Image (cartoon, rainbow, N blue to C red):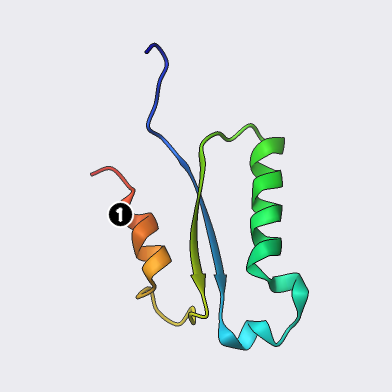
């Protein structure tokens, strides 16, 4: 198939337990909506979400973040 690619647009969402107290504006659902809108507006194709809900940003030992890093070609 000509022009086919396996490239993705990685979209990362995270919400720590502390952030949940801040209200709806920081929800995973809202983050996903904002990121998808940005992708469409800037013509980024093949979006793929990586989500860490309830994880602190203190370190990088988060399953969604690690899965996103694993997608990087070596």
- Horizontal and vertical percent position of residue 21: 70, 88
Q: Residue at x 67, y 63 (%)?
A: 29
Quadrant of the image occupied by residue 43: top right
Q: Nearer the viewer, residue 74 or 30?
A: 30
Residue, disc 1: 70
Q: Residues within 10 Å of mark 1 (few under 14, many from 20)?
A: few
Q: Residue at x 23, y 44 (%)?
A: 74
Q: Residue at x 70, y 72 (%)?
A: 26
> The N terminus is located in which quarter?
top left
Local secondary structure at mark 1: helix
Left or right of residue 56: residue 30: right
- Horizontal and vertical percent position of residue 16: 56, 81
Q: How many marks?
A: 1
Left or right of residue 66: residue 9: right
Quadrant of the image occupied by residue 2: top left
Quadrant of the image occupied by residue 23: bottom right
Vertical placement of residue 24 versus 36, above or below: below
Left or right of residue 36: residue 71: left
Q: Residue at x 49, y 78 (%)?
A: 57
- Horizontal and vertical percent position of residue 28: 63, 67
Query: Residue pushed farthest top?
Result: 2
Vertical placement of residue 10 versus 8, above or below: below
Vertical placement of residue 2 versus 43, above or below: above
């Amino acid at each position: 198939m000509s022009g086919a690619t396996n490239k993705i647009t990685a979209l990362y969402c995270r919400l720590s337990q502390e952030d949940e107290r801040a209200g709806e504006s920081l929800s995973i659902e809202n983050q996903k909506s904002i990121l998808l809108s940005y992708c469409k507006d800037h013509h980024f194709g093949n979006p793929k979400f990586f989500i860490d809900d309830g994880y602190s940003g203190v370190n990088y030992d988060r399953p969604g973040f690690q899965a996103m890093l694993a997608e990087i070609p070596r």
